[in-house]
Amino acid sequence: MRAGNFVKLGFYEVYVSEYVIQELNQVPDQAERERLLNVLTDYPIELRPVTSFTEVGFLARNYLDRGVMPPKKLLDALHVAFCVFDEFD
């Protein structure tokens, strides 16, 4: 069974943050961008708001400053920091 089927059947709870939306909106190819954004409506995916921008940003900046993540990967660092701050598995 494909992973998407497990999501549709409710085996997994899937969440995304506003950072995911930002990243998807940066996909240069319009057809690919629309295909990826449609996944958010085709599957039971919950958009989780970032409620603690200061803390998440501080944590992400620490990841970049300490070399945990490459300096040019700010959105990736924000993804990770958001998940850590909100205690996602």
Image (cartoon, helix red, strand yellow):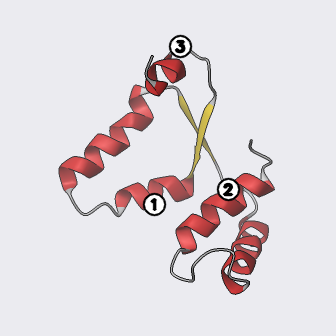
The residues bearing labels 3 and 1 have C-alpha atoms spaced at a distance of 27 Å
Residue assigned mark 1: 22
The three-letter code of the residue at mark 1 reads Gln
Mark 3 neighbour class, 10 Å CA radius: few under 14, some 14 to 19, many 20 or more: few
> In the structure shown, which secondary structural element does the residue marked by tag 2 occupy?
loop
Quadrant for residue 60, please give it: bottom right
Residue 10 position, x and y percent, is 59, 17
Residue 28 position, x and y percent, is 25, 63
Residue assigned mark 3: 9
The three-letter code of the residue at mark 3 reads Leu
Q: Is residue 82 left or right of residue 14?
A: right
Task: Tell me whether circle 3 and circle 1 mark residues in contact (CB < 8 Å).
Answer: no
Which residue does the image show at 43% across and 22% down from the upper left? 2
Residue 12 position, x and y percent, is 62, 25
**Does residue 79 lie above or below 31 as drawn?**
below
**Does residue 48 lie above or below 84 as drawn?**
above
The residues bearing labels 2 and 3 have C-alpha atoms spaced at a distance of 27 Å
Which residue does the image show at 19% across and 48% down from the upper left? 31
Residue assigned mark 2: 50
Q: Is residue 87 left or right of residue 24?
A: right
Which residue does the image show at 28% across and 51% down from the upper left? 33
The residues bearing labels 1 and 2 have C-alpha atoms spaced at a distance of 12 Å
Which residue does the image show at 71% across and 67% down from the upper left? 53
- Camera-nearest residue between 67 and 73: 67
The three-letter code of the residue at mark 2 reads Val
Residue 20 position, x and y percent, is 50, 54
**Does residue 64 lie above or below 22 as drawn?**
below
Residue 78, disc: none
Label located before the other in sequence (1 or 2): 1
